[in-house]
Image: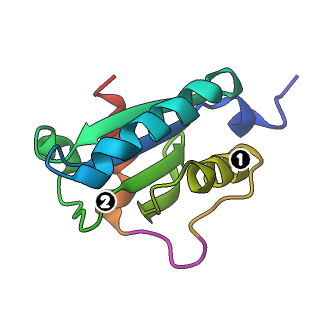
């Protein structure tokens, strides 16, 4: 029997790209880790990435604002960009991703961003 919904079983990768010197990121880390912890049973895996200490993982991806979040299911990037540092914003985004309602849309993302989930998984 073929699984009609294979993507539902694929864990959701959520990465927060921040910098150690960023005071906004300091406060957001606890929010991020709590959200990931709350949704672990639903298949959410989180990675905190310091863009300076782990710059090799970013490759050509440019992070201009903090916090920047990547949400991916497998190799499919569902979201990449800066977010407001509020628990409710992250919870809504992750809820939409888990419900299959989050996608990049027609604009998509450039190649370095699309390759980021594979590189991020190497950090685990």
User: Residue 73: where, in percent of width, then height?
Assistant: 57, 42
Left or right of 55 on screen, residue 46: right
The C terminus - image quarter: top left
At horizontal 57% and vertical 50% (from top left) the residue drawn is 90
Give residue 1's mark.
none
Quadrant of residue 38 within the rendered picture: top right
User: Residue 22: where, in percent of width, then height?
Assistant: 20, 52
Left or right of 120 on screen, residue 38: right
Left or right of 1 on screen, residue 62: left
Label the magenta part by its dominant secondary structure. loop
**10 Å crowding of disc 1: few (<14), some (14-19), many (20+):** some
Near-viewer residue (48 or 117) = 48
Near-viewer residue (123 or 33) = 33
Near-viewer residue (50 or 89) = 89
User: Magenta span has 67?
Assistant: no
User: Residue 1: where, in percent of width, then height?
Assistant: 88, 22
- What stretch of residues is rendered in magenta? 105-109
Secondary structure of the residue carrying numbered label 1? helix
Give residue 95's mark.
1
Which of marks 2 and 1 precedes in the sequence? 2
Give residue 66's mark.
2
């Amino acid at each position: 029997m073929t699984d009609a919904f294979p993507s539902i079983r694929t864990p959701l990768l959520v990465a927060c790209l921040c910098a150690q010197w960023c005071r906004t990121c300091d406060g957001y880390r606890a929010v991020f880790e709590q959200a990931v912890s709350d949704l672990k049973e639903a298949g959410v895996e989180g990675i905190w990435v310091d863009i300076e200490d782990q710059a090799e993982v970013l490759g050509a991806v440019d992070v201009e604002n903090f916090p920047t979040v990547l949400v991916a299911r497998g190799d499919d990037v569902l979201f990449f960009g800066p977010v407001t540092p509020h628990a409710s914003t992250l919870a809504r985004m992750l809820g939409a991703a888990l419900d299959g309602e989050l996608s990049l849309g027609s604009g998509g993302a450039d190649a370095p961003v699309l390759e980021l989930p594979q590189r991020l998984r190497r950090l685990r």
